[in-house]
Image (cartoon, helix red, strand yellow):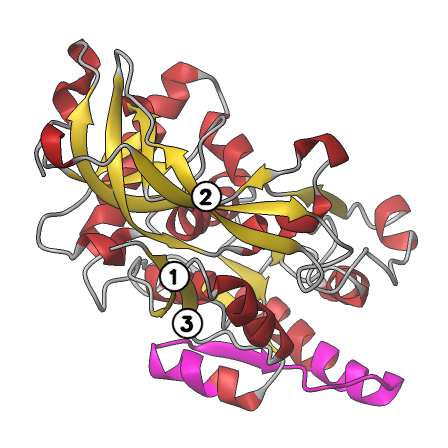
């Protein structure tokens, strides 16, 4: 694409009203939006694809009132089509396929975005650029979680809930490349367990739809046996709700629960005895905190190392590759409502712009 071929206007997705949940949000395609012009140190990216992450749709209805109309999308992939110049742009010349982290006033659910080069990551040329759309949030979270388990907690194993998600599948594949790490995968349904077995998961606990005390205790006993067998001292939980208390019950003395999601609502069922007398801890895991930990001198080598590892696995069936279900700006709202209503976890929803 030459400069003359870049249009003057574009389309993008916005949330006009938050509602009380994803289904009641009001979302529209905004047309005739001026295509942004890159400044020095920035590039213009023709967006090819962007994923729909839980952190995306959680923001649609959970942001402060003055944020609306709300621009959408935290990451995506595309091709650099223009540059604002500056020394730093040498890393991503025109024509470079890139993944990008959407920051500031621009978000990824748009046909074009301008990004500072520090938010752009060159992608492998042997992988279709649309398949790099989920290059950041899930793969870097997987690396961050394993860094916490190995280097912060010093544990040879850990528990992971909602383990059939795309992130969970990445963790299974990444752990299988390591000689000194095991993951205990907690899922709700047997078909999710089968999916994980097919990609090499060794340790799986199925909770079922247990609501009564007896059936809940059965899967907790199974999980505790695995925790003891493998020496796991920590858990990473995307669910919260009553799962928080269940995990605290099975963790060992001085064990740590890291929460990074709230699929099951607010934390509940937590016995304070674990905190008072058994030395257990509860903390949050946030990708941005991990990325920035230790300041610039720690962040740069951390990101370079992670980027090399992620890029090497983006080509299917590599550990950081993602299975997608495609949608459009016009259909994404209905599709995400349908996926959430059916508890589907096999594929990630991806908006295509090409």
Q: Which residue is mark 2?
A: 144
Q: Label 1, secondary structure: give it.
A: strand
> Mark 2, mark 1: which one is toward the viewer?
1
User: Is the residue 195 above or below the residue 170 in the image?
Assistant: below
> Mark 3, mark 1: which one is toward the viewer?
1
- For disc 1, the neighbor class at 10 Å (few under 14, some 14 to 19, many from 20) is many
The answer to whether residue 259 is visible is: no
Q: Which residue is mark 3?
A: 347
Q: Position of residue 211 (x, y in %)?
A: 83, 84
User: Is the residue 235 above or below the residue 153 in the image?
Assistant: below
Which quadrant: the C terminus? bottom left
Viewed as shown, does residue 197 lie left or right of 94?
A: right
Q: Which residue is mark 1?
A: 350
Viewed as shown, does residue 289 lie left or right of 328?
A: right
Chain part drawn in magenta = 194-220
> Mark 2, mark 3: which one is toward the viewer?
3
Residue 35 on the magenta span: no
Looking at the image, which residue is at 24% across and 25% down?
A: 43
């Amino acid at each position: 694409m030459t400069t003359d071929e870049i249009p003057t206007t574009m389309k993008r997705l916005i949330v006009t009203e938050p509602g009380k949940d994803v289904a009641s949000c009001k979302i529209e395609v905004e047309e005739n939006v001026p295509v942004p012009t890159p400044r020095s140190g920035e590039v213009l990216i023709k967006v090819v694809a962007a994923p729909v992450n839980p952190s995306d749709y959680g923001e649609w209805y959970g942001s402060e009132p003055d944020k609306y109309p709300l621009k959408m999308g935290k990451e995506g992939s595309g091709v650099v089509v223009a540059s604002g110049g500056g020394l730093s742009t040498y890393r991503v010349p025109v024509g470079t396929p890139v993944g990008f982290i959407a920051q500031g006033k621009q978000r990824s659910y748009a046909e074009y975005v301008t990004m500072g080069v520090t938010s752009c990551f060159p992608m492998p040329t042997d992988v279709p650029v649309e398949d790099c759309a989920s290059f950041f949030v899930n793969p870097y979270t997987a690396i961050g979680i394993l860094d916490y388990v190995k280097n912060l907690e010093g544990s040879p194993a850990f528990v992971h809930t909602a383990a059939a998600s795309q992130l969970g599948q990445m963790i299974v594949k990444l752990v299988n490349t390591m000689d000194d790490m095991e993951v205990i995968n907690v899922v709700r349904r047997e078909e999710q367990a089968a999916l994980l077995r097919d990609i090499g998961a060794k340790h799986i606990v199925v909770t079922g739809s247990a609501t009564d005390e007896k059936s809940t205790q059965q899967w907790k006993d199974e999980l505790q046996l695995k925790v003891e067998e493998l020496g796991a001292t920590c858990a990473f939980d995307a669910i919260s709700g009553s799962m928080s208390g269940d995990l605290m019950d099975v963790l060992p003395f001085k064990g740590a629960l890291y929460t990074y999601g709230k699929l099951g609502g607010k934390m509940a069922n937590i016995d304070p005895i674990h905190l008072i007398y058994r030395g257990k801890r509860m903390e949050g895991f946030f990708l941005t905190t991990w990325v920035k930990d230790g300041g610039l001198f720690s962040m740069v080598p951390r990101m370079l190392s992670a980027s090399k590892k992620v890029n090497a696995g983006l080509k299917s069936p590599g550990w950081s590759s993602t299975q997608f279900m495609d949608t459009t700006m016009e259909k994404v709202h209905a599709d995400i409502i349908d996926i959430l209503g059916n508890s589907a976890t096999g594929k990630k929803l991806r908006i295509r712009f090409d």
